[in-house]
Image (cartoon, rainbow, N blue to C red):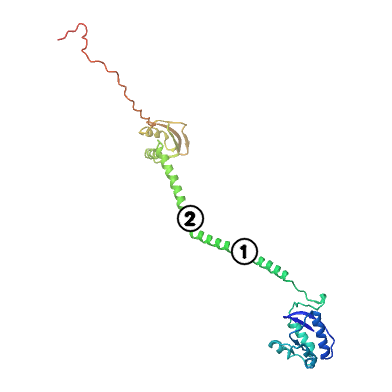
Amino acid sequence: MVCLNQGRVELSRTVPVKNGDDLAGEVTATLRLLGWNDCDAVWISGDDAPEFLAASALEQFGVPVTEPPWRPSALALIQKLPEEDFGAAMLALAVALGSTRPTLNLLAVELRPRTFSTGQLVTAGTAAITALLGLALVVGQGYQQQRYADRLSQAIRVLDPDVKAVEALSTELAQKRRLLESIQSVEKNDLRALPILRELTERIPAEAWLRTFNMDKQGIEITGQAGAANQLIPLLENSPSLARVEFTAPVTKAGDKEQFRIKAAWKNVPKAPEPAPKPQTPVSSPARPAGPRNPQPGASGR
């Protein structure tokens, strides 16, 4: 006997009855136990349901005594139950189709299936959602950083030709700057090496050649080989730029050539320009009063 109150189980008990009178007495006792004055309906199902439904003792409750109002889906399953053990099969079907967590659980604790409470399910769901959000955040940040790195790499590849062109221009500019500094340093120097070398090339015979050439503000010093080193002295003396040409070391023989070392001084040593004198302000002398000059003694005048 199961007592329902708006679909919620209030009481469930097993009662040994043989006929409708016994069943009516148990129903009355159960209502008194629950504190109910009456009931709205009495449903009977099972193996001997037709006999109990026809019992006149149940009419005293003044309510409909019928089979349960089965849903169409449940009725279709009930019609497939075996007739030889119909009542037990119906109870098994009711348990199978019922709630997994009934309000009134009559099973022993050790036989009950392990279930989770609502709080445990909420906690587990919250933890799972938090883990998923954290994982999504990490994945999203990684994806965003990857996209930023890809865009940065693409921008670098686009700018790479321009960067190489700028580097080439910078290298060329540095070379030209060094060349310009060299030219400026040569122009600032009072001694010009190229004209002197050209003059030596014109004056020294073709069969002679120079090994070293040193030049400073005092003069030049050359070393080399020639067929007749003594002939070089008058040739260099006739130069408009050189004077006091002389050997600085003895002439030595090297095969059919003579090795020489000659030193010469400049005829006109260039001097640094002297700074121009600052203009001086003229100092005016005090004015002398005008008047007739005194004649010298012994001079007469008209």
The residue most toward the top is: 298
Q: CA distance from mark 2 to mark 1?
A: 37 Å
**Callout 1: few (<14), some (14-19), or many (20+) C-alpha neighbours within 10 Å?**
few
- The residue under label 2 is which amino acid type? Val
Which residue is identified by label 1? 137
- Secondary structure beneath label 2: helix
Please name the residue shown 75% across and 83% down the image. Answer: 96
Can residue 208 be seen in this snapshot?
A: no
Asked whether 45 or 221 is in front, the reply is: 45
Which residue is identified by label 2? 163
Asked whether 230 or 147 is in front, the reply is: 147
- Secondary structure beneath label 1: helix
| The quadrant where residue 299 appears | top left
On screen, 286 above or below 190? above
The residue most toward the left is: 302
Q: Looking at the image, is mark 2 or mark 1 earlier in the sequence?
A: 1
Q: Which mark is residue 46?
A: none
Q: Position of residue 101 (x, y in %)?
A: 75, 77
**Callout 2: few (<14), some (14-19), or many (20+) C-alpha neighbours within 10 Å?**
few
Q: Position of residue 42 (x, y in %)?
A: 76, 87
Q: Position of residue 249 (x, y in %)?
A: 47, 31
